[in-house]
Image: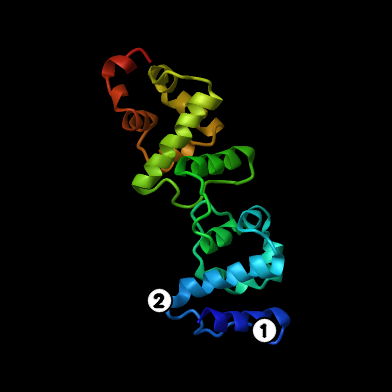
Amino acid sequence: MSSSVLDRYRRILSGEQKRFSPYEFEDLQYRKQKLQSIVRYAIENVKKWTPEQARRELSMKDVKELKLHLIREYIEPPIEAKPDDVYYLVEFAYPYLPRYTEEQRVLWVYKEVLAGIRRHFPPLYFQSVKGEERAKICFEYMFRELMKLQDIYELPKIFGKTERAYAILKKYKLKILVDTLYFSPFDMLTDMYPELNNPELWKDC
């Protein structure tokens, strides 16, 4: 099965064939195996790369030259992937490659937002339970690493005034958390840190 799809892929690479048949990947039972074999062939036999090297170096230009753009629509990108990212094609073909943890992926996205590499977070990034986890990872990075605070009990003093709270969140590109996930900065903090849900901590703010 995989050898026949590779025969067709080699013909595409040589220019004998323009694209795969619309029915090539119709059978879900064999789709993943076919796609993996194509990507692996491109990396190992055409580029002569190791999987690790491919994950580091594969570019959109390579994808087009290798005609992998013809199968890209069948490989779902992770939510963190930018439109021109192609590393996930390699990770799809080699599932055993070590992956970033969820926290590492979230911080990668957040740091790119802070640096202006991304204009905004991916759509629906902070939706659902997974989104709440991502929100807390970003917020913790903001107050511990960017604001250099360590004690969560300092947060009510800083975020107790709504206008100031919004200004801080806007400065560190996290106003989206309140805009899409929480009703207010107070709601956000007491949800992330239930121990802060004590009126005594907020009364003098």
Distance Cα–Cα, label 1 vs label 2: 24 Å
Q: Is residue 56 left or right of residue 22?
A: right
Callout 1 crowding tier (Cα within 10 Å): few <14, some 14–19, many ≥20? some
Q: Is residue 120 left or right of residue 129?
A: right
- The residue wearing badge 2 is 29
Front in this rendered view, residue 119 or 1: 1
Query: Could you tell me which secondary element the residue under label 2 belongs to?
Result: helix
Q: Quadrant of residue 181?
A: top left
Residue at x 51%, y 66% (from the top left corner): 75
- Tell me the number on the disc at residue 159: none
Q: Amino acid at mark 2?
A: Gln
Q: Is residue 102 left or right of residue 68?
A: left
Q: Position of residue 180 (x, y in %)?
A: 41, 44
Q: Quadrant of the C terminus?
A: top left
- Tell me the number on the disc at residue 11: 1
Q: Amino acid at mark 1?
A: Arg
